[in-house]
Amino acid sequence: MLHSSVIPFIALFLVVILHLLEQANTEKCDYFTGNWIYETSSKSPFYDSKLCPFIGKEFSCEKNGRPDQRYHNYRWQPTSCNLSRFNGHDLLEKLRGKSVMFVGDSLSRNQWTSLVCLLYNSEPQQKYKFTRGSDDLTMLTFTEYDVKVMLNRNQYLVDLVNETNGRILKLDSIEISGKPWKGIDMLIFNTWHWWYRKGSGQPWDYIEVSNELYKDMDRMVAFEKALNTWAAWIDNNIHPSTSIVFFQGISPTHYNGTEWDEVGGTCMGETELIEGSTYPGGSPLALKVLKKVLSTVENMVTLLDITNLSQLRKDGHPSIYGINGKSVMDCTHWCLSGVPDAWNQILYNLLL
Ligand SMILES: *[C@@H]1O[C@H](CO)[C@@H](O)[C@H](O)[C@H]1NC(C)=O
Ligand SMILES: *[C@@H]1O[C@H](CO)[C@@H](O)[C@H](O)[C@H]1NC(C)=O
Ligand SMILES: *[C@@H]1O[C@H](CO)[C@@H](O)[C@H](O)[C@H]1NC(C)=O
Ligand SMILES: *[C@@H]1O[C@H](CO)[C@@H](O)[C@H](O)[C@H]1NC(C)=O
């Protein structure tokens, strides 16, 4: 027989063990490995893109005449656990009084737009204030919650400055870029798609490294150097107790059908995703470089490792139903509602 005085201690011990087991379980959960499930319930898609006032023409595939609909209705299912449904009211409550900022290129705008649509859709009657700043800063404030969701357009993260020599991309300087990031409660960074731009699409004349100017260099090396500069900025400027930092990861493109065994194809006319969990084309080298740099950051940065799950969605891009219609083939961005909603659902689950 146990002495009755030890029973409370045994109970407490069991509670602690259960709690630890539960923690181990959530830590083990890999949200980024899984497959897409077609869902036709009333809860899918996440929102009606035609009713979200913040979607620009570039992501409004349906309005731009895309005839098929299935791409709206897929839900991401991790293999080893379940995602909670996105709950906009709950997230606004959690973020009350706080600021969120997406920093990066148009893939950041893609995810920002998805998030503001998801939040708006949860309470379409709520008041908001939309500000488009002059300095590459767009802001949507959900006024009842005092939540600011911002977008800072910045293709390279490191400084790009005009000097007498021309436009200089400074791989080891980030002071100018970093100004708007200070004091933000939650930051979600991204840079990748601009690194291989050449010719008229390249917005710089020289690359500067250690005070030397170069006409050009290996772009993957340049990308890694810039990421290292960014990583040092995070360690020097972010206080982990007050700010939370994510990296959006490498969003894949679908211009080369050979990757999914369709010779000569692009994303044009793709209405079906890739079944299962594995993309035949393998993993991009940029992701390896990014992971290597992230492993050196001392402060906590969480990678939204969205590459694989997005690779499976060759059906998710605008193709000719994007900003410039038939004249441009867009297999880079994502139609909304669509793939970035799943990125944000995972982001929400990581914050729970
Ligand atoms: C996920 O949800 C399904 C059904 O909703 C359930 O059967 C399954 O046990 C859940 N899996 C986990 C790991 O919680
Ligand atoms: C830099 O110069 C380019 C033209 O060479 C111009 O388009 C751009 O606005 C300038 N940027 C700044 C910050 O002055
Ligand atoms: C398309 O992908 C295949 C296989 O990954 C590769 O061999 C080929 O060079 C690529 N084509 C282009 C135009 O990039
Ligand atoms: C993504 O796919 C690659 C192979 O293409 C694999 O090595 C990697 O573990 C996968 N990552 C995740 C998060 O599933």
Image (cartoon, rainbow, N blue to C red):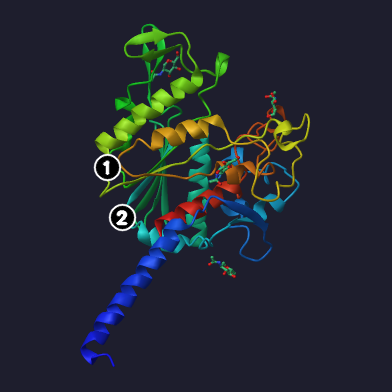
Q: Nearer the viewer, residue 170 or 47?
A: 170
Image location (x, y in percent) of residue 235 = 28, 36
Q: Residues within 10 Å of mark 2 (few under 14, many from 20)?
A: some
Task: Report the amino acid beneath label 1.
Answer: Gly
Quadrant location, ligand no. 4: top right
Comparing 122 with 100, the one in front is: 100
Quarter containing the N terminus = bottom left
Q: In this view, does 173 lie to the left or right of 104?
A: left
Residue drawn where x is 62% and y is 57% of the image: 45
> Which amino acid does the dot numbered 2 rest on?
Gly
Q: Can residue 124 be seen in this view?
A: no
The residue sitting at the left extreme is 5
Residue named by callout 2: 97
Q: Which of 231 and 114 is in front in this view?
A: 231
Corner quadrant of residue 284: top right
- Element at badge 2? loop
Can you say which quadrant of the picture contains the C terminus?
Answer: bottom left
Q: Residue drawn at (30%, 32%), measured in percent from left and top?
A: 233
Residue that numbered label 1 is attached to: 183
Vertical arrangement, residue 35 with respect to residue 25, above or below: above
Q: Pick whichever, 133 or 337, lies toward us.
A: 337
